[in-house]
């Protein structure tokens, strides 16, 4: 059982990690797909004190070097779901499972628009992890709607077990797919079903008959990550110590709301980690 | 009338300044005596992301360079008192006066022990600014209790107008005083008076008869800085946007409470400045 898991791979997560390391806690960073961060695209950042005019790519590289120099490992596992087990948390990260006494959530900008029908059919044909739920749809028709290239791997996996796989990319790069996957360059309009399960994905140009829709976003809906986590205007609600409404769960960075800024994220990561240390001391 | 004044000269103040500058606000940093900061004494800082193992002196120098490269001026004026004028704030910084629409307080670690009698006789012989109130004690006896070398200058000034000047340093370096100033290397025990004004400074070894006691600390008591500012456990009470209970007044860094950390200070400075910008837009 680890002391803590940090979910996320941006400035807040790295800042939290430095502090947990200094305080000798056992922990892991589960960073997910590191390619997908808006920070990487910032050409020049002028308000991270001490590093004037640095680019987003340089800054995140400096953070990563710092973390690695401190002997902290960054894992690429993407966390799909966390179960609150009372006195610890069980994390499902695709094929891996991890247990930790406390959690630091730093999953980034959490606000986004749900698709029509997404919330209604969540768990009834709509899912966020093809690796986890794909086997339920053996020899059936499925679609993957993806904000990033991660979806391509999921599609290739599903193409091995499903009868039909539609792939709807929400990004500009040309996807690398195999012949079994049908590329659909259309805009999602609605996810339709009979009330108990999904049967159609409606786009601006067609209606796809299918059994499941997997949605791969850069960040997971945070309320999907951990049941009972209180939100405020779509962001995770925290107090000044970065504690959420669930004891042992702390949050930091963009997922706690505006302003979406690096310095704010780094500061909150610092505070969240020290609050987690205090929490760990109190439950020992 | 400036848009804002930042009071303080540490990481939170500098971080706030970068953001006000980027957002094109007119403002000033009133940093006070820059020599006096605990950060300068940190030999190695491992948890400021991106700059592993940096010393406190190097880090504050990097911050100062960054601020100066952005064309921001740092003034050494020390703010003694702020008056809330309703729709703006009037700052008394020794012999200078400044007006600003909003304030960012970043004065550092605010908790300290008051001397016995200090609060009772504040304004009745006890003061924090010899330059301001010294002239009231022409040809009288005064003492200066000082946490730093700044007090020596105040003592030299008072020695020109007062009949007797006692100097009680609370630091290790040998003070540079003139012959008219009496160096008292004793520990302050109590400030005594007749209920309406001070008449005695009691130390562990003697009782000094006098008319005024000036106390020079590294930071001013925050509740002395601005009347009506709400505190919580001795620190300035702020919400998640770094707003205090007074509209137009924001606070960040160590003065808002634990943890006393650079990353936290920098993050709070970032948020305080952006909240101040929002406030300025709303009152325009």
Image: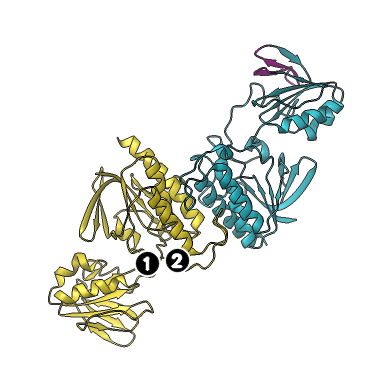
Chain colours: A yellow, B cyan
Residue B211, located in which quarter of the rendered image? top right
Q: On the picture, is A271 further left or further right than B255?
A: left
- Name the foreground residue: B281 vs B208: B208
Whether discs 1 and 2 lie on one chain: the answer is yes
Residue denoted by label 2: A40
Query: Residue B40, how many percent across, how many down?
Result: 58, 39
Q: What range is drawn magenta here?
A: B185-205
| Chain to which the residue tagged by mark 1 belongs | A
Residue B162, picture quadrant: top right
Q: Which disc is residue A35 wearing?
A: 1
Looking at the image, residue A193 sits to the left or right of residue B19; the answer is: left
Say which chain tag 2 marks. Answer: A
Q: Residue at x 64, y 59 (%)?
A: B21
What is the x, y in percent for residue A100? 27, 46
- Which residue ends up furthest to the bottom in the rendered image? A205
Between the residue at mark 1 and the residue at mark 2, the CA separation in whole angstroms equals: 8 Å
Q: Quadrant of the C terminus of chain B?
A: bottom right
Q: Is residue B189 magenta?
A: yes
Which mark identifies residue A61?
Answer: none
């Amino acid at each position: 059982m680890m002391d803590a898991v940090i979910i996320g791979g941006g400035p807040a997560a790295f800042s939290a990690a430095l502090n947990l390391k200094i305080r000798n806690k056992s922990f892991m960073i589960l960073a997910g797909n590191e390619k997908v961060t808006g920070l990487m695209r910032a050409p020049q950042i002028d308000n991270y004190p001490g590093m004037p005019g640095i680019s987003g790519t340089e800054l995140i590289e400096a953070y990563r070097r710092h973390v690695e120099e401190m002997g902290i490992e960054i894992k690429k596992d993407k966390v799909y779901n966390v179960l609150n087990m009372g006195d610890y948390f069980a994390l499902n990260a695709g094929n891996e499972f991890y247990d930790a006494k406390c959690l630091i959530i730093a999953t980034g900008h959490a606000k986004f628009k749900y698709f029509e029908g997404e919330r209604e059919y969540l768990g009834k044909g709509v899912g966020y992890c093809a690796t986890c739920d794909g086997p339920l749809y053996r020899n059936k028709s499925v679609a993957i709607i993806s904000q990033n290239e991660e979806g391509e791997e999921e599609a290739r996996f599903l193409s091995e077990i499903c009868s039909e796989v539609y792939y709807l990319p929400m990004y500009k790069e040309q996807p690398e797919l195999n012949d079994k996957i049908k590329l659909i360059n259309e805009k999602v309009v609605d996810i339709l079903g009979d009330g108990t399960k999904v049967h159609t994905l409606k786009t601006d140009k067609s209606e796809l008959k299918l059994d499941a829709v997997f949605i791969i976003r850069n960040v997971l809906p945070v309320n999907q990550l951990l049941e009972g986590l209180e939100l405020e205007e779509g962001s995770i609600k925290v107090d000044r110590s970065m504690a959420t409404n669930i004891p042992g769960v702390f949050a930091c960075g963009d997922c706690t709301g505006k302003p979406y800024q690096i310095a704010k994220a780094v500061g909150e990561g610092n505070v969240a980690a020290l609050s987690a240390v205090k929490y760990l001391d109190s439950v020992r």
